[in-house]
Amino acid sequence: MNENIIVDIARQALYIVLKISTPVLLASLVVGLVISILQTITSIQEQTLTFVPKLIVVFLMLMLIGSWMLSIVRDFAVELITNFHYYVNIL
């Protein structure tokens, strides 16, 4: 197996991880920012207050876009399996 192939597969895998995790992380970031602003306005200094809303938003995002995330990972796995004969160098 050529080193370039390994680097290319790793690059594709990292790109897919970034692509599928970005919507969930952005939603969690927005909710955390809104809760932090509300805490600053109301002078509530409870550190655990943002945990439950973030958890709920992450679960909702996974329910909404989970099938899209799974299809992207499935397509990548199918591509790896179909091109497996290129990756294995049999003497």
Image (cartoon, helix red, strand yellow):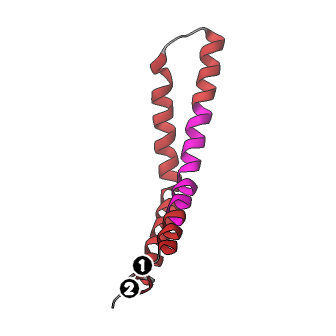
Inter-mark Cα distance, 2 to 1: 6 Å
* Residue behind mark 2: 89
Q: Are marks 2 and 1 in contact (CB under 8 Å)?
A: yes
How many labels, in total?
2
- Which quarter of the rendered picture does the C terminus lie within? bottom left
* Residue behind mark 1: 1
Q: Position of residue 15 (x, y in %)?
A: 56, 60
Mark drawn on residue 38 = none
Amino acid type for the residue under numbered disc 2? Asn
What's the magenta bit mostly, secondary-structure-wise?
helix
Q: Position of residue 39 (x, y in %)?
A: 59, 16
Amino acid type for the residue under numbered disc 1? Met
Query: Where are the magenta residues, as a range?
Result: 12-31
Q: Residue at x 52, y 39 (%)?
A: 57
Answer whether residue 64 is magenta in the image: no
Q: Residue at x 51, y 56 (%)?
A: 17
- Classify 10 Å Cα crowding around label 2: few (below 14), some (14-19), many (20 and above): few
